[in-house]
Amino acid sequence: MKVLVIGSGAREHALARALTHDPTVSAVIAAPGNPGTDAIALNEPVDAADPEAVLELARRHDVGLVVIGPEAPLVAGVADALREGGIRCFGPSAAAARLEGSKAWAKEVMAAAEVPTGMARVCTDEQQLADALDSFGPPFVVKDDGLAAGKGVVVTEEREEAVAHGLVCLAKGEDARVVIEEFLDGPEASLFCICDGTTVVPLDLAQDFKRVFDGDEGPNTGGMGAYSPLTWAPEGLVDDVVDRVAQPVVDEMARRGTPFVGVLYVGLALTSRGPRVIEFNVRFGDPETQSVLARLESPLAVLLGAAADGGLADHDPLRWRPEAAVTIVEAAAGYPASPRKGDPIDGLEELTAGPLAEHVHVLHAGTALEEGQLVSSGGRVLSVVGLGEDLTQARERAYEGVEAIELDGGHHRSDIALRASRGEIRA
């Protein structure tokens, strides 16, 4: 079977890498892909958010399955066009993708499904924004109602910063809305749930790091690193989240006539009152995917194909590698405010061919080739994934891999998974 992966980031590189290890997969096509996927798959240029262009590409290559990575193509209806064209697709319809496309609508679905989450108010003008901020008080949680590439949320003690972000969100158009939420305490966790419209199969837990600097300082980013498993998570947490969150939402979506087929990403806060949903996404998260898929032993194409076919109830239990995985994001100079592009990247050949290669791999995100030289082309440039017997060893290997990379002005956090490796996190 040929599999087409839509997208160009490190998440898509991780998906392509996992798919190439699946014995049922004969070839992987990445569209548009990146220099990293080009080494393991066939890259094809395409506008990922153009449903007809993606459908034509899938037909041309006679693919047996399409896996959609980013959220924008899902909201644009790419999955709908593929299914209508008779192509198996892993990814929700545009109607179901509203769970990520609209934070306000997601809250409505959560309320109907009786999902535990924080209180929220939806604002459409400056006065409503001010009233909501005053009602909740600091820390202020301000979310763009629409898609914002993982950077639409501000959590701050400063009211002026909260107002400023809220006004930016409201200025995006006539129908723009901003969501003000109750701050949820406690450590955060991410759970990917594979769904076929009826059945839910959870992957393993992960935790990511949104702030750009050590100690969770600085502005939010798309994610500076992640690790899996969560050795500190309460026993039974995954089953609890499936029973109280994922399955009720999948049931509610089916009741509304918008069955959910794809990844339901459940972002959680493990509060003093129990788990609470921070947000839903409708695709694999980045950079958590890089760590989770590094540990998955079960064939990925078989799993995603079963979801596309409505057959998860008959899927074998998932198998996991016993190792821990830690992902470090190497970012470009100036990220996240104004990432610099065009800086040469060196050291990857030595890393992939050296003694670390057995335990460390590098996934491309914001890279490009210019006259044979690999250069930075985006904010998050590379994801370095280390595997080890435990988080301590996985961290050591991942950071050893990061240190081998040469990127002028490149920066990364030095504390990914550090507290977890020391046993300092309690839920």
Image: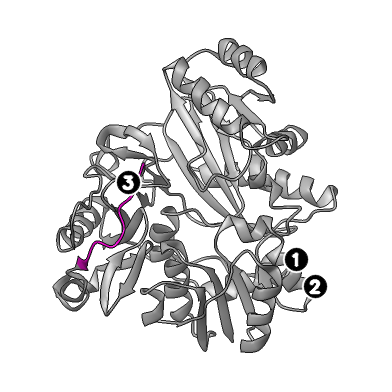
Give 344 or 14, whichever is nearer the viewer: 344
The Cα atoms of the two marked residues, 2 and 1, are separated by 6 Å
Q: In the rendered structure, which segment of residues is drawn in magenta?
A: 337-345
Residue 30 image position (x, y, % from top left): 50, 76
Q: Do the residues labelled 2 and 1 touch (CB within 8 Å)?
A: yes
Give 143 or 327, whichever is nearer the viewer: 143
Q: Which of marks 1 and 3 is nearer the N terminus?
A: 1
The Cα atoms of the two marked residues, 1 and 3, are separated by 35 Å
Residue 124 image position (x, y, % from top left): 69, 25
Q: Are marks 1 and 3 in contact (CB under 8 Å)?
A: no
Q: Mark 3 points at which residue?
A: 335
The Cα atoms of the two marked residues, 2 and 3, are separated by 40 Å
Q: Mark 2 points at which residue?
A: 84
Q: Earlier in the sequence, mark 2 or mark 3?
A: 2
Q: In this view, does 148 lie to the left or right of 360?
A: right
Residue 348: mark: none
Q: State the SS at label 2.
A: helix
The three-letter amino acid code for the residue at tag 2 is Glu
Residue 302 image position (x, y, % from top left): 58, 76
Q: Mark 1 points at which residue?
A: 80
